[in-house]
Amino acid sequence: MPNRFLSPRFRLARICTLIALPLFGAIAAFGTAPESQLLLSRTATPEPLSIDFGEALVPSLESFIREERFQRGDTVSTLLSRLGVNSDDTNKLLRTQAAFMNGLRAGTSVRAEVGVDGTLLVLTYTSGRETLASLNREGASFKVSESRLAFSPQTVLRSGTIRSSLFAAADGAGLPDSVAIQLAEVFGADIDFHRDLRKGDRFSVVYEVMYHSGQAVRPGKLLAAEFVNAGKSHRAVWFANADGGKGGYFTPEGKNLRKAFLRSPLEFSRVTSGFGMRMHPIMQQWRAHRGIDYAAPTGTRIRAVGDAVVEFAGQQGGYGNMVILRHNGEYTTAYGHLSRIAPNLQRGTRISQGDTVGFVGQTGWATGPHLHFEFRIAGEARNPLAIALPAAVPLAQTEIGAFRQQALPLAAKLDLMGSTNLALLQ
């Protein structure tokens, strides 16, 4: 019979037996030893064994802690029932703490401390704002509080092979979508993930997973990556200088991978109309198309391809809702047919590469939801998929030593995964 079914009295008797047996064995050994080895006189009688176990060996169970995951299709009542909360407290929470309980999302892990009578003492879960939401009993009521999570990062290594798409390969490798997006952004200036992927391309990544109280909360930053595209290896490692400045990705040799411009204003999409002459879908006549059209669902985020100042944000004829950005020198970019422009974006606003400028829509002369993107140099529209993009600022000489110290271990991890992948392919 398993130990958990034994009564406290039976467990206490069993403990006493286990302790007493070695003692009785020791007394028997003294009885068979030669007289010269005995420390007791022949007439001495051992004192009776007297042990006061007290109540420490049999603690009284006043509460227990249980953890459950809020599953798809669950109600708050079913979750609290699995946690052992009685119906009185369940009804009280539904009446008085509806806002707190509405913060639960499918997949959220919920921990509760519950009394033996089902009284809820403490209930906690991690909210989507990366805070720990807590509900503590205070007499007959409950007090709600929130605190920032203290994260402990752990390093994870993953590798995969392209069969159809980057996201399909990422799913097969157990790589979170957010890390796959970072991977595409890091190499986006050198690899067009819309057109350049080949079956058999492979990747290796080193990234952080943020833990709280021993549980994985979310994936973090991509620390190092290798992408082999059409047989050519591209590598990147993350580096942030010691003074806490803005970090970036570099080759293991120290070359800055960040270009002054991203190749595409959308993270993932497909080109539906390229640069050059085309039949206009509304005018039904041949016209020069001075930009690139990217098909994407309405509401898809559009990002600035480079650091810039907003030159225009509003409606402009056939472009519908439009944003025009002025970058360093003679470069400007334009984003048309937006469903809406990003909040607080107006003429003179400074934005950074990757910031949101708006969302895909169908305003102006558009037959379907898409982004019309133009890249202009000295006012002349150029094909952004064909021109060579200028590089960003290189690594400073004073930072090379610190960079190498950080980059070498990450590059070694990529070497290890690369050799493992080759061994599996052979």
Image (cartoon, helix red, strand yellow):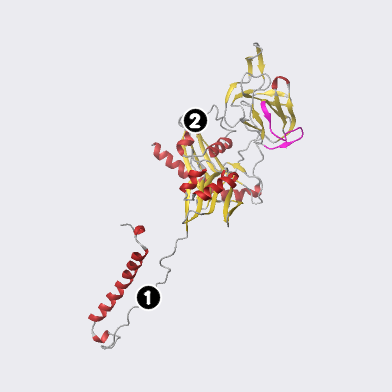
Residue sitting at x 31%, y 70%: 17
Query: Relative to 248, does residue 327 appear above or below in the rendering?
Result: above
- Circle 1 SS class: loop
Task: Give the overall secondary structure of the magenta segment.
Answer: loop
- Horizontal and vertical percent for residue 50? 36, 78
Query: Relative to 80, does residue 270 appear above or below in the rendering?
Result: above
Neighbourhood count class around disc 2 (C-alpha, 10 Å): few under 14, some 14–19, many 20 upward? some
Q: Quadrant of residue 379?
A: top right
The magenta region covers: 338-352
The answer to if 339 sits in the magenta stretch is yes
> Label 1 to label 2, Cα distance in Å?
71 Å
Amino acid type of the residue tagged 1 in the rendering: Ile
- Horizontal and vertical percent for residue 314? 73, 27
The residue beneath circle 2 is 165
Amino acid type of the residue tagged 2 in the rendering: Ser
- Horizontal and vertical percent for residue 298? 61, 27
In the figure, is residue 6 to the left or right of 201? left
Residue sitting at x 53%, y 50%: 89
Mark closer to the chain start, 1 or 2: 1
Q: Quadrant of residue 276?
A: top right
The residue beneath circle 1 is 51
Q: Is residue 62 visible?
A: yes
- Circle 2 SS class: loop
- Horizontal and vertical percent for residue 92? 56, 48
